[in-house]
Image (spheres, coloured by chain):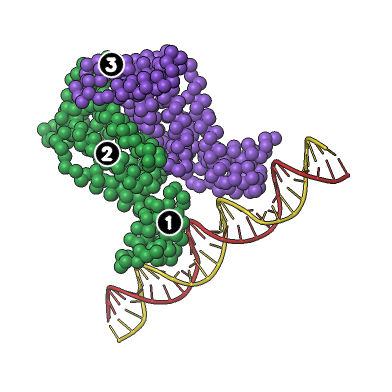
Chain colours: A green, B purple, C yellow, D red
Amino acid sequence: MSLDGQLPPKMRLLRAAAELLAKSAGASVSTRQITQLAGVTAPTLYHHFGDKEGLFDAVVAAGFEEYVAGERDFAPSGNPLEDIRRMWDNHVQFGLKQPELYLVMFGNIRPESRPAIVADAEALMEEMLNKAAAAGQLNVQPREAARSILAANVGVTLMLIAEPAAERNLELSTMTRDAMIFAVSAAQAEGAAPEDSGKSSVVVAAIALNAALQASHSDQLSSSELKLFLEWLHRISTSTSS
Amino acid sequence: MSLDGQLPPKMRLLRAAAELLAKSAGASVSTRQITQLAGVTAPTLYHHFGDKEGLFDAVVAAGFEEYVAGERDFAPSGNPLEDIRRMWDNHVQFGLKQPELYLVMFGNIRPESRPAIVADAEALMEEMLNKAAAAGQLNVQPREAARSILAANVGVTLMLIAEPAAERNLELSTMTRDAMIFAVSAAQAEGAAPEDSGKSSVVVAAIALNAALQASHSDQLSSSELKLFLEWLHRISTSTSS
DNA sequence: TCAGTTCATATAGCAATGCTATAGGTGATA
DNA sequence: TATCACCTATAGCATTGCTATATGAACTGA
């Protein structure tokens, strides 16, 4: 019952809330529990965070920073698709290590409350996919691919969290991961997929060029020219031949 | 303020809870609101459902029956993969029509509380995938495929719910859906995928035979023979050639 | 040095919540 | 009619999130 280091009460509240949230298996955590563990009285909480939800938002924000740090910390391997795999695995590991926090971040999403985190996570994924696109490894727009992969990533993580820890089979994760990456990557364009083999190398090249352009901030075209050019590229790279 | 038809109080409580849960955007619904709307006093609720959570569980169970009914209601189209697409779309539509209910069902999943629903949903999906496997359209075990597809389906639905209704882009759903089905189906085995082109037609055939056997309850082998035979099949069909 | 100002914490308590001990009413059966 | 199981209501308890108000500490400017 002692988080009374010399830390300021704000930090102690954050840590107490995070700790109680982590160990309470879904049961609701009361402000009295939090303040007691932090060695602080109620008004202090409301002075710093305004609200119980405000405190939890702060906990979530801290957790998200940890998540982002984990996603950025490994050095790029040279193969963007391989980096995306690692990103996926990092995401899953984060969810399994801090399930309660993860559930608050990605399980309780509501339109009016918290899509900012999702947008940030998508941006992180898109950033990596842009490299793949620039290398000609992508079959679809990086943004769409990022949203799609992240959605599957979240779904898999939630499913794994829902399972009793003993029965968790990580093959679900690797299988879904590779399925998504494969479907999104340019590998299939080399002849297979009978239904949409029309995704010719033209499309892949257009996507790659698009990504390269947006990444390099080229100055060789005026902004209005660039806008139109990108629009054409977009039309080409999203065209389906069916 | 009147759900006082001649329905029994138990039904009125269920409907009141469902209605309040549906319109309260994430805010917690109090038992007093529910009992008042149902025209009933508190002990009645606890007599019938024991708990507030018990009542919500009942609401979820009713919602899940509705979900299952929706998943079963369309006639099979002859093409199992096409049926799986419809199943996916049904799932997404259900989530978008009843977001609050869906969030309780799939967003708040915790290992100790509610994996039964997930297991049922998986079984539903697996049932359909067995047909695809029997038709030689599947590249992996039906159970694994079902878990994978359902996970992606849940993730996509949650992401769409998280978005403001105005900006919802269903292309995320169709794209992820087709990506998953493509990756799981046997189509790619016909030559493309350079990394694991080893998924030869032997594997596909083994999976198909396995599904057919389990579906037909063949009596031509004794149960112990069948068990061993299935084990071998399983070994074949899960072998990777990398 | 000291009044003034601001920030941070504590005392005490309110309204709303989930839930229950107890009792009253209703219908079917004997 | 009496009994008995079932269902519902009155009243109230403990806990919840939150706040009105007051006290202390630290810094500012003269």
Chain identity of mark 3: B
Front residue (pair B129, B168): B129
Same subunit, tags 2 and 3 = no
Q: Is residue B155 left or right of residue A236?
A: right
Q: Earlier in the sequence, mark 1 or mark 2?
A: 1
- Identified at 43% across, 13% down, the residue is B220
Q: Secondary structure at mark 2?
A: helix
Mark 1 lies on residue = A51
Q: Check disc 3 and report the residue beneath it.
A: B202
Question: Residue A109's quadrant in the figure?
Answer: top left
Per the image, label 1 sits on a secondary structure element best described as loop
Instruction: Choose top left, top right, bottom left or bottom right for residue B121.
Output: top left
Pair 1/2: label in front:
2
Q: Quadrant of residue B160?
A: top left
Disc 3, SS: helix
Q: Are marks 3 and 1 on the same chain?
A: no
Q: Amino acid at mark 1?
A: Asp
Q: Residues within 10 Å of mark 3 (few under 14, many from 20)?
A: few
Amino acid type indicated by mark 3: Val
**Chain containing the residue with disc 1:** A
Q: Are marks 1 and 2 on the same chain?
A: yes
Amino acid type, callout 2? Asp
Q: Residue A195's mark?
A: none
- Rounded to the nearest angstrom, the CA distance separating label 3 from label 1 is 61 Å
Residue A197 placement (x, y as % from top left):
24, 16
Residue that appears at 56% across and 46% down: B52
* Residue indicated by mark 2: A89
